[in-house]
Amino acid sequence: MLMHMAQHKGPVTSEVLAKAMDTNPVVVRRIMAGLRDDGYVRSEKGHGGGWVIARDLSKITLRDIYDALGSPSLFAMGNRTEAPGCLVEQAVNAVLDSAFDDAEALLLSRLGNVSLAMLSADFHARLKRRSRRMEIEDVH
Amino acid sequence: MLMHMAQHKGPVTSEVLAKAMDTNPVVVRRIMAGLRDDGYVRSEKGHGGGWVIARDLSKITLRDIYDALGSPSLFAMGNRTEAPGCLVEQAVNAVLDSAFDDAEALLLSRLGNVSLAMLSADFHARLKRRSRRMEIEDVH
DNA sequence: CGTCATGTACTATCTGAAGTTACATGAGAC
DNA sequence: GTCTCATGTAACTTCAGATAGTACATGACG
């Protein structure tokens, strides 16, 4: 959604974003709430209102967004019991915790190294490629 | 469940395993089915039947078990669209795919390095620690 | 002051995992 | 042989969590 806003100039309404994401304006607002609270976007009410990016794209990483959205758990599975009395389960949990923690750390560090500015650059590169391809198809 | 079976000698019924895992025998059978198909356990019907480990514990890794269970997706989130027309989404997907793939590779390799024999050793170490603690508590 | 926008509580829908029931199949005891 | 005990599996049923949608309050601008 932030990338779509970056393309627009001026505020973008939840309505427009919802159309772009094929969902409901309320869903958009709910998601944006976290980003607003963390200062990445600003919302403006009334005529000509909508959502505006409030910080330089190079200063927003995917990790930032992940955190603003409440750092939801990344993995599809967790320990059966968090503090089991069963010693078997304790042994298993210890190994799994360590492996999952390391994987999570790697993933988050990767997200922290990607700014929206980079994504925007990649997007424009793709745009150029696509339009070139279009021209070639036109000739044929 | 395999660790619990390793403690027992002789076949263990789904009923007993279900009690230990606080679940239903049918759920146990469903899970064990994958392990049986991959040759990690054997099932025996009739009197005195149940589940038996069919391979040395040092030859079974957590990764093996993960695969036998059908390699369910590890992450709690995926791309909104797998092959989006939207170039913004393509750019985002490319970055996320790469990060998630690397995290998955790390995690699976960690699981591949842990055998049930190691877990069993850890379990027995914990058992020893616990019984020592019990004795001390007895004295006091 | 009417219209357009966000903010949010409340409700509804959807989906996948887990649990359950029911019954078929096969192995051993007697 | 047949009775009992075990697995094998196909339905079916819950249940919880995510997502979507409705309703209405609040605030800004023309």
Image (cartoon, coloured by chain):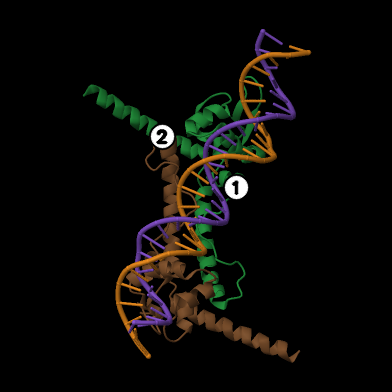
Chain colours: A brown, B green, C purple, D orange
Q: Is residue A60 visible?
A: yes
Q: Residue at x 52, y 57 (%)?
A: B104
Q: Which mark is residue B67?
A: 1
Vertical side of A52 occupied by C9: above or below: above
Quadrant in the picture for residue A107: bottom left
Whether residue A82 sits left or right of residue A130 in the image: it is left
Q: Disc 2 on helix, strand or loop?
A: helix
Q: How many marks?
A: 2
A109 vs C21: above or below: below
The chain under label 2 reads A
Residue A68, percent from left and from top: 37, 66
Look at 34% across and 31% down and name the residue there.
B130
Image quadrant assignment for residue A47 = bottom left
Q: CA distance from mark 2 to mark 1?
A: 24 Å
Q: Residues within 10 Å of mark 2 (few under 14, many from 20)?
A: some
Q: Check the image and name the residue furthest to the left.
A: B140
Q: Nearer the viewer, residue B35 or C26?
A: C26
Q: Reply above or below: A20 against A86.
A: below
Residue plotted at (51% across, 37% down):
B117
Residue A10 circle label: none
- Where residue A93 appears, x then y in whole percent? 43, 43
- Which amino acid lies under the numbered mark 2 shown in the image of this protein? Leu
| Residue B56 visible in the current orientation | no
- The residue labelled by disc 2 is A87
Local SS, label 1: helix
Q: Position of residue B69 (x, y in %)?
A: 59, 45
Tell me which chain the residue with mark 1 is part of: B
Instruction: Name the one closer to the observer, B44 or B135.
Output: B44
